[in-house]
Amino acid sequence: MNEHAQRALERLRNPDSAAVSELAAVLVDHANHTLIRELAPPRWIASQLAAALEAATHGDLLRDWVDQRIDARRTRWATEERPLRDWVTDDVIAPLHALVGRPVTLHEELVFRIIDQPEIRSFISGILHDTVHNFRRRVSDLDTGRIGSLGRRAARRGRGLFGQVGRNLSGMAENLVDAVKEEVDQALETRVQEFIDNATAETVATLARAAADEGNAATLGALRLAILDVVLDTPVRQLAAEADKQQPEDLADVVVAAIRAAVAQEDFVSRAETRIAAVLAEAGDQTLGAWLMEIGLAQVWSETTTELLTEHMTSVVSDDPFEAWWEALHAP
Protein backbone atom coordinates (compact mmCIF):
# COMPACT_ATOMS: atom_id res chain seq x y z
CA MET A 1 0.00 0.00 0.00
CA ASN A 2 1.46 3.37 -1.00
CA GLU A 3 2.04 6.20 1.45
CA HIS A 4 -0.98 8.28 0.43
CA ALA A 5 -3.34 5.31 0.70
CA GLN A 6 -1.93 4.42 4.13
CA ARG A 7 -2.42 7.96 5.44
CA ALA A 8 -5.98 8.04 4.09
CA LEU A 9 -6.78 4.71 5.75
CA GLU A 10 -5.36 5.91 9.06
CA ARG A 11 -7.44 9.08 8.79
CA LEU A 12 -10.58 7.01 8.20
CA ARG A 13 -9.78 4.88 11.24
CA ASN A 14 -8.83 7.78 13.51
CA PRO A 15 -11.63 8.22 16.11
CA ASP A 16 -10.87 11.95 16.26
CA SER A 17 -11.27 12.36 12.52
CA ALA A 18 -14.55 13.53 10.99
CA ALA A 19 -13.87 11.79 7.67
CA VAL A 20 -16.33 8.92 8.16
CA SER A 21 -19.11 11.12 9.52
CA GLU A 22 -18.60 13.54 6.61
CA LEU A 23 -18.92 10.66 4.16
CA ALA A 24 -22.10 9.51 5.92
CA ALA A 25 -23.50 13.04 5.64
CA VAL A 26 -22.74 13.04 1.90
CA LEU A 27 -24.71 9.79 1.50
CA VAL A 28 -27.67 11.18 3.44
CA ASP A 29 -27.62 14.42 1.47
CA HIS A 30 -27.59 12.44 -1.78
CA ALA A 31 -30.59 10.43 -0.62
CA ASN A 32 -32.44 13.61 0.36
CA HIS A 33 -31.98 15.02 -3.16
CA THR A 34 -33.13 11.81 -4.84
CA LEU A 35 -36.67 11.57 -6.22
CA ILE A 36 -38.80 9.28 -4.09
CA ARG A 37 -39.79 7.17 -7.09
CA GLU A 38 -36.09 6.66 -7.90
CA LEU A 39 -34.97 5.52 -4.46
CA ALA A 40 -35.60 1.88 -5.36
CA PRO A 41 -37.59 -0.04 -8.00
CA PRO A 42 -41.07 -1.06 -6.77
CA ARG A 43 -40.32 -4.68 -7.65
CA TRP A 44 -37.23 -4.70 -5.45
CA ILE A 45 -39.09 -3.08 -2.53
CA ALA A 46 -41.93 -5.61 -2.88
CA SER A 47 -39.56 -8.58 -3.00
CA GLN A 48 -37.63 -7.32 0.01
CA LEU A 49 -40.89 -6.82 1.88
CA ALA A 50 -41.92 -10.38 1.09
CA ALA A 51 -38.54 -11.73 2.17
CA ALA A 52 -38.62 -9.78 5.43
CA LEU A 53 -42.16 -10.89 6.28
CA GLU A 54 -41.40 -14.50 5.39
CA ALA A 55 -38.29 -14.47 7.57
CA ALA A 56 -40.12 -12.83 10.45
CA THR A 57 -42.95 -15.36 10.43
CA HIS A 58 -40.72 -18.40 9.98
CA GLY A 59 -40.50 -20.45 13.14
CA ASP A 60 -40.98 -18.78 16.52
CA LEU A 61 -38.76 -15.75 15.97
CA LEU A 62 -41.57 -13.18 15.74
CA ARG A 63 -43.65 -14.86 18.44
CA ASP A 64 -40.69 -14.91 20.84
CA TRP A 65 -40.05 -11.22 20.15
CA VAL A 66 -43.71 -10.38 20.77
CA ASP A 67 -43.73 -12.40 24.00
CA GLN A 68 -40.67 -10.56 25.25
CA ARG A 69 -42.21 -7.18 24.44
CA ILE A 70 -45.48 -8.11 26.16
CA ASP A 71 -43.66 -9.38 29.25
CA ALA A 72 -41.63 -6.18 29.44
CA ARG A 73 -44.74 -4.01 29.10
CA ARG A 74 -46.68 -6.18 31.54
CA THR A 75 -44.00 -5.74 34.19
CA ARG A 76 -43.88 -2.00 33.57
CA TRP A 77 -47.65 -1.42 33.51
CA ALA A 78 -48.48 -3.68 36.46
CA THR A 79 -47.59 -0.91 38.92
CA GLU A 80 -48.45 2.15 36.80
CA GLU A 81 -51.00 4.17 38.76
CA ARG A 82 -51.29 7.05 36.32
CA PRO A 83 -54.42 7.07 34.16
CA LEU A 84 -54.27 6.35 30.45
CA ARG A 85 -55.09 10.02 29.78
CA ASP A 86 -51.59 10.96 30.99
CA TRP A 87 -50.10 8.82 28.22
CA VAL A 88 -52.20 10.31 25.42
CA THR A 89 -51.34 13.77 24.14
CA ASP A 90 -53.97 16.48 23.89
CA ASP A 91 -53.64 16.68 20.11
CA VAL A 92 -54.78 13.04 19.97
CA ILE A 93 -57.58 13.27 22.54
CA ALA A 94 -59.37 16.12 20.74
CA PRO A 95 -59.82 14.33 17.38
CA LEU A 96 -60.50 11.05 19.21
CA HIS A 97 -63.36 12.72 21.10
CA ALA A 98 -64.71 14.16 17.85
CA LEU A 99 -64.58 10.75 16.18
CA VAL A 100 -66.10 8.71 19.02
CA GLY A 101 -68.82 11.25 19.82
CA ARG A 102 -69.92 11.79 16.23
CA PRO A 103 -73.69 11.17 15.88
CA VAL A 104 -74.16 8.09 13.70
CA THR A 105 -77.44 6.51 12.60
CA LEU A 106 -77.13 2.77 12.03
CA HIS A 107 -79.31 0.55 9.85
CA GLU A 108 -81.94 -1.13 12.04
CA GLU A 109 -81.98 -4.45 10.18
CA LEU A 110 -78.18 -4.66 10.34
CA VAL A 111 -78.11 -3.85 14.05
CA PHE A 112 -80.81 -6.46 14.69
CA ARG A 113 -78.83 -9.15 12.85
CA ILE A 114 -75.73 -8.24 14.86
CA ILE A 115 -77.33 -8.34 18.31
CA ASP A 116 -79.95 -11.06 17.69
CA GLN A 117 -77.58 -13.81 18.81
CA PRO A 118 -78.28 -16.76 21.13
CA GLU A 119 -75.67 -15.49 23.58
CA ILE A 120 -77.26 -12.04 23.82
CA ARG A 121 -80.75 -13.52 24.14
CA SER A 122 -79.49 -15.83 26.89
CA PHE A 123 -77.87 -12.89 28.67
CA ILE A 124 -81.03 -10.77 28.54
CA SER A 125 -83.23 -13.73 29.45
CA GLY A 126 -81.05 -14.48 32.46
CA ILE A 127 -81.38 -10.91 33.72
CA LEU A 128 -85.18 -10.96 33.26
CA HIS A 129 -85.44 -14.40 34.83
CA ASP A 130 -83.56 -13.35 37.96
CA THR A 131 -85.52 -10.10 38.24
CA VAL A 132 -88.95 -11.71 37.83
CA HIS A 133 -88.19 -14.65 40.10
CA ASN A 134 -86.80 -12.41 42.82
CA PHE A 135 -90.03 -10.43 42.65
CA ARG A 136 -92.05 -13.66 42.68
CA ARG A 137 -90.21 -14.87 45.74
CA ARG A 138 -91.00 -11.70 47.63
CA VAL A 139 -94.66 -11.87 46.59
CA SER A 140 -94.78 -15.58 47.38
CA ASP A 141 -93.42 -15.00 50.86
CA LEU A 142 -96.11 -12.39 51.40
CA ASP A 143 -98.87 -14.63 50.01
CA THR A 144 -97.66 -17.61 51.99
CA GLY A 145 -98.06 -15.63 55.16
CA ARG A 146 -101.59 -14.54 54.25
CA ILE A 147 -102.85 -17.84 52.82
CA GLY A 148 -101.13 -19.90 55.47
CA SER A 149 -102.71 -17.73 58.12
CA LEU A 150 -106.10 -18.30 56.50
CA GLY A 151 -105.58 -22.06 56.56
CA ARG A 152 -104.52 -22.01 60.19
CA ARG A 153 -107.54 -19.92 61.18
CA ALA A 154 -109.84 -22.32 59.32
CA ALA A 155 -108.18 -25.24 61.07
CA ARG A 156 -108.61 -23.69 64.52
CA ARG A 157 -112.28 -22.95 63.86
CA GLY A 158 -112.85 -26.48 62.56
CA ARG A 159 -111.40 -28.01 65.70
CA GLY A 160 -113.46 -25.72 67.92
CA LEU A 161 -116.80 -26.26 66.17
CA PHE A 162 -116.72 -29.96 65.31
CA GLY A 163 -114.47 -31.64 67.84
CA GLN A 164 -112.85 -34.81 66.48
CA VAL A 165 -114.41 -34.22 63.10
CA GLY A 166 -113.12 -30.68 63.25
CA ARG A 167 -109.61 -31.94 63.66
CA ASN A 168 -110.00 -33.84 60.39
CA LEU A 169 -111.49 -30.76 58.75
CA SER A 170 -108.55 -28.65 59.92
CA GLY A 171 -106.15 -31.03 58.20
CA MET A 172 -108.24 -30.85 55.05
CA ALA A 173 -108.19 -27.05 55.19
CA GLU A 174 -104.40 -26.89 55.39
CA ASN A 175 -104.03 -29.46 52.60
CA LEU A 176 -106.51 -27.55 50.48
CA VAL A 177 -104.58 -24.32 50.95
CA ASP A 178 -101.30 -26.04 50.01
CA ALA A 179 -102.89 -27.62 46.94
CA VAL A 180 -104.31 -24.29 45.78
CA LYS A 181 -100.95 -22.58 46.34
CA GLU A 182 -99.12 -25.30 44.36
CA GLU A 183 -101.51 -24.98 41.43
CA VAL A 184 -101.11 -21.22 41.44
CA ASP A 185 -97.30 -21.55 41.48
CA GLN A 186 -97.31 -23.98 38.56
CA ALA A 187 -99.63 -21.80 36.50
CA LEU A 188 -97.58 -18.73 37.34
CA GLU A 189 -94.32 -20.47 36.40
CA THR A 190 -95.67 -21.19 32.93
CA ARG A 191 -96.82 -17.61 32.49
CA VAL A 192 -93.53 -16.24 33.83
CA GLN A 193 -91.45 -18.23 31.32
CA GLU A 194 -93.77 -17.15 28.52
CA PHE A 195 -93.40 -13.54 29.64
CA ILE A 196 -89.59 -13.81 29.78
CA ASP A 197 -89.40 -15.30 26.28
CA ASN A 198 -91.60 -12.57 24.82
CA ALA A 199 -89.82 -9.84 26.77
CA THR A 200 -86.40 -11.08 25.58
CA ALA A 201 -87.46 -10.93 21.93
CA GLU A 202 -88.99 -7.49 22.41
CA THR A 203 -85.87 -6.24 24.21
CA VAL A 204 -83.61 -7.27 21.33
CA ALA A 205 -85.92 -5.60 18.82
CA THR A 206 -86.14 -2.49 20.99
CA LEU A 207 -82.35 -2.25 21.24
CA ALA A 208 -82.07 -2.47 17.45
CA ARG A 209 -84.71 0.22 16.98
CA ALA A 210 -83.09 2.47 19.56
CA ALA A 211 -79.63 2.12 17.99
CA ALA A 212 -81.04 2.93 14.53
CA ASP A 213 -83.24 5.80 15.69
CA GLU A 214 -81.87 9.07 14.35
CA GLY A 215 -83.21 10.83 17.42
CA ASN A 216 -80.90 8.73 19.61
CA ALA A 217 -77.74 9.36 17.57
CA ALA A 218 -76.52 12.23 19.75
CA THR A 219 -77.35 10.34 22.95
CA LEU A 220 -75.45 7.25 21.82
CA GLY A 221 -72.53 9.47 20.81
CA ALA A 222 -72.52 10.98 24.30
CA LEU A 223 -72.60 7.44 25.74
CA ARG A 224 -69.54 6.45 23.71
CA LEU A 225 -67.76 9.59 24.90
CA ALA A 226 -68.60 8.77 28.51
CA ILE A 227 -67.20 5.26 28.07
CA LEU A 228 -64.06 6.68 26.42
CA ASP A 229 -63.53 9.10 29.31
CA VAL A 230 -63.90 6.28 31.84
CA VAL A 231 -61.20 4.32 30.00
CA LEU A 232 -58.92 7.37 29.74
CA ASP A 233 -59.32 8.11 33.46
CA THR A 234 -58.67 4.50 34.54
CA PRO A 235 -55.19 3.69 35.91
CA VAL A 236 -53.01 1.90 33.38
CA ARG A 237 -52.42 -0.84 35.93
CA GLN A 238 -56.11 -1.74 35.95
CA LEU A 239 -56.43 -1.59 32.15
CA ALA A 240 -53.39 -3.84 31.80
CA ALA A 241 -54.92 -6.36 34.19
CA GLU A 242 -58.13 -6.42 32.13
CA ALA A 243 -56.16 -6.76 28.88
CA ASP A 244 -54.23 -9.68 30.35
CA LYS A 245 -57.48 -11.62 30.71
CA GLN A 246 -57.71 -11.66 26.91
CA GLN A 247 -54.32 -13.41 26.64
CA PRO A 248 -52.65 -10.88 24.28
CA GLU A 249 -49.95 -13.42 23.40
CA ASP A 250 -52.53 -15.43 21.48
CA LEU A 251 -53.20 -12.44 19.25
CA ALA A 252 -49.65 -12.75 17.96
CA ASP A 253 -50.45 -16.23 16.63
CA VAL A 254 -53.40 -14.82 14.69
CA VAL A 255 -51.29 -12.01 13.21
CA VAL A 256 -48.40 -14.33 12.33
CA ALA A 257 -50.76 -16.82 10.67
CA ALA A 258 -52.42 -14.05 8.67
CA ILE A 259 -49.07 -12.63 7.50
CA ARG A 260 -47.74 -16.08 6.65
CA ALA A 261 -50.85 -16.87 4.60
CA ALA A 262 -50.67 -13.55 2.75
CA VAL A 263 -46.96 -13.89 1.89
CA ALA A 264 -47.50 -17.49 0.74
CA GLN A 265 -49.85 -16.35 -2.03
CA GLU A 266 -48.23 -16.55 -5.47
CA ASP A 267 -49.24 -13.03 -6.47
CA PHE A 268 -48.19 -11.32 -3.21
CA VAL A 269 -45.06 -9.70 -4.69
CA SER A 270 -46.82 -8.57 -7.87
CA ARG A 271 -49.74 -7.09 -5.92
CA ALA A 272 -47.36 -5.38 -3.49
CA GLU A 273 -45.35 -4.03 -6.43
CA THR A 274 -48.47 -2.52 -7.97
CA ARG A 275 -49.43 -0.77 -4.75
CA ILE A 276 -45.90 0.46 -4.05
CA ALA A 277 -45.59 1.77 -7.61
CA ALA A 278 -48.87 3.67 -7.18
CA VAL A 279 -47.64 5.24 -3.94
CA LEU A 280 -44.34 6.25 -5.50
CA ALA A 281 -46.14 7.65 -8.56
CA GLU A 282 -48.23 9.88 -6.30
CA ALA A 283 -45.01 11.47 -5.06
CA GLY A 284 -44.36 12.76 -8.59
CA ASP A 285 -41.14 14.74 -8.78
CA GLN A 286 -40.91 15.18 -5.02
CA THR A 287 -37.57 14.33 -3.46
CA LEU A 288 -37.14 12.39 -0.25
CA GLY A 289 -35.83 15.50 1.49
CA ALA A 290 -38.80 17.62 0.33
CA TRP A 291 -41.23 14.99 1.59
CA LEU A 292 -39.44 14.77 4.94
CA MET A 293 -39.53 18.55 5.19
CA GLU A 294 -43.25 18.52 4.45
CA ILE A 295 -44.00 16.15 7.32
CA GLY A 296 -41.56 17.87 9.68
CA LEU A 297 -38.99 15.05 9.94
CA ALA A 298 -36.19 16.34 7.68
CA GLN A 299 -33.80 17.40 10.43
CA VAL A 300 -34.32 14.48 12.78
CA TRP A 301 -34.12 11.95 9.93
CA SER A 302 -30.92 13.44 8.53
CA GLU A 303 -29.25 13.61 11.94
CA THR A 304 -30.20 10.13 13.12
CA THR A 305 -29.46 8.49 9.76
CA THR A 306 -26.06 10.19 9.54
CA GLU A 307 -25.27 9.00 13.06
CA LEU A 308 -26.35 5.43 12.27
CA LEU A 309 -24.34 5.32 9.03
CA THR A 310 -21.29 6.73 10.82
CA GLU A 311 -21.40 3.95 13.41
CA HIS A 312 -21.65 1.21 10.79
CA MET A 313 -19.04 2.72 8.49
CA THR A 314 -16.61 3.19 11.38
CA SER A 315 -16.94 -0.51 12.11
CA VAL A 316 -16.47 -1.41 8.45
CA VAL A 317 -13.27 0.63 7.89
CA SER A 318 -11.74 -0.98 10.98
CA ASP A 319 -12.06 -4.51 9.59
CA ASP A 320 -9.34 -6.39 7.74
CA PRO A 321 -11.52 -7.04 4.65
CA PHE A 322 -11.88 -3.27 4.15
CA GLU A 323 -8.12 -2.80 4.45
CA ALA A 324 -7.55 -5.52 1.83
CA TRP A 325 -10.08 -3.89 -0.47
CA TRP A 326 -8.53 -0.47 0.13
CA GLU A 327 -5.05 -1.73 -0.66
CA ALA A 328 -6.26 -3.41 -3.84
CA LEU A 329 -8.05 -0.19 -4.83
CA HIS A 330 -4.81 1.80 -4.61
CA ALA A 331 -2.57 -0.83 -6.17
CA PRO A 332 -0.61 0.38 -9.19
Image (cartoon, grey):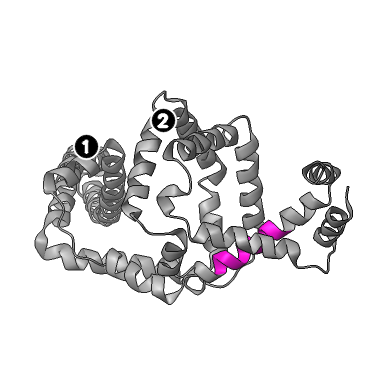
So how many labels did they put on this image? 2
- Left or right, residue 123 beside residue 292: left
- Where does the image place residue 268, in percent across and percent down from the top left? 41, 30
- Where does the image place residue 13, in percent across and percent down from the top left? 84, 58
Quadrant holding the C terminus = top right
Magenta: predominant secondary structure element? helix
Residue type indicated by callout 2: Phe
How busy is the neighbourhood of tag 1: few (under 14 within 10 Å), some, or many (20 plus)? few
Residue 253 shows in this picture: no
Residue type indicated by callout 1: Gln
The residue positioned 61% from the left and 67% from the top of the image is 303
- Where does the image place residue 104, in percent across and percent down from the top left? 18, 60
Residue identifier under label 1:
186
- Is residue 295 shown in magenta? no
Confirm or deny contact between disc 2 and disc 1 (CB under 8 A). no
Q: Quadrant of residue 266?
A: top left
Residue at disc 1, secondary structure:
helix
Residue 128 shows in this picture: yes
How busy is the neighbourhood of tag 2: few (under 14 within 10 Å), some, or many (20 plus)? some
Number of the front mark, 2 or 1: 2
- Where does the image place residue 279, in percent across and percent down from the top left? 35, 48
Q: Is residue 247 above or below residue 35?
A: above
**Along the line of sight, which residue is nearer the eye, 322 or 53?**
322
Which disc, if any, is residue 268? 2
Which range of residues does the magenta coloring cover? 300-310
The residue positioned 47% from the left and 63% from the top of the image is 289
Q: Which of the marked residues, 2 or 1, is nearer the chain's N terminus?
A: 1
